Image (cartoon, grey):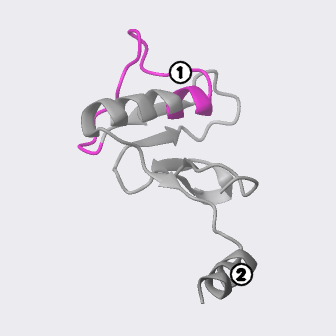
């Protein structure tokens, strides 16, 4: 529905102790990104598959940013499974009520 936001990729954050060692899971697919926990690390993120493999992209085991790792896994998930889990913004109750009134 226009005006209510676009569906977005379902990334779920799991915070580690003190905000370190966090993980970001791609829905319930098993693909995830891990942060090493070191606050000044140059390459703090690693990408992982459902079977526990650490992936490399262009010969590097780590990409510079969280978003780069997420995009890498989104592309891989699309390639291997044909889709990526999405979150669809809820429709406001007001519109649902109006639509049902109009149908009567």
Q: Which residue sits at x=54%, y=56%? A: 87
**Closest to the observer, 83 or 17:** 83
Residue neighbourhood size for the residue with mark 1, other residues' Cα within 10 Å, grouped as few (<14), some (14–19), many (≥20): many
Quarter of the image with the C terminus is: bottom right
CA–CA distance in space, label 1 to label 2: 48 Å
In the image, 21 versus 47, the foreground residue is 47
Q: Earlier in the sequence, mark 1 or mark 2?
A: 1
Quadrant of the drawing holding the N terminus: bottom right
Q: Residue at x 75, y 80 (%)?
A: 94
Above or below for 47 versus 31: above
Q: Nearer the viewer, residue 40 or 94?
A: 94
Q: What span is in magenta?
A: 50-70
Judge left or right: residue 81 versus residue 11.
left
Query: Residue 98 got which mark?
Result: 2
Q: Residue under circle 1?
A: 63
Main SS of the magenta part reads loop
- Counting every numbered tag in the picture gives 2
Q: Residue furthest top?
A: 59
**Left or right: where does residue 100 sit relative to residue 49?**
right
Q: Nearer the viewer, mark 1 or mark 2?
A: 2
Q: Where does residue 53 sit, x and y in percent of width and height?
A: 28, 34
Instruction: Using a 10 Å C-alpha cutoff, classify the residue at mark 2 as few (fewer than 14 neighbours), some (14 to 19) or many (20 or more).
Output: few
Q: Residue at x 58, y 30 (%)?
A: 44
Give percent across and percent down for residue 69. 51, 29
Near-viewer residue (15 or 101): 101
Q: Whole-percent x and y of residue 4?
A: 72, 58
User: Dividing the picture into quarters, in which one does residue 77 lie?
Assistant: top left
């Amino acid at each position: 529905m226009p005006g209510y936001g676009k569906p977005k990729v379902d990334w779920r954050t799991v915070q580690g102790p003190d905000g370190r060692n966090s993980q970001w899971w791609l829905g319930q697919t098993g693909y995830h990104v891990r942060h090493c926990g070191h606050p000044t690390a140059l390459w703090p993120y690693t990408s992982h598959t459902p079977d526990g493999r650490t992936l490399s992209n262009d010969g590097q085991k780590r990409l510079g940013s969280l978003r780069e790792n997420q995009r890498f896994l989104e592309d891989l998930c699309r390639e291997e499974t044909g889709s990526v889990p999405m979150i669809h913004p809820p429709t406001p109750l007001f519109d649902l009520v109006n639509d049902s009134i109009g149908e009567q």
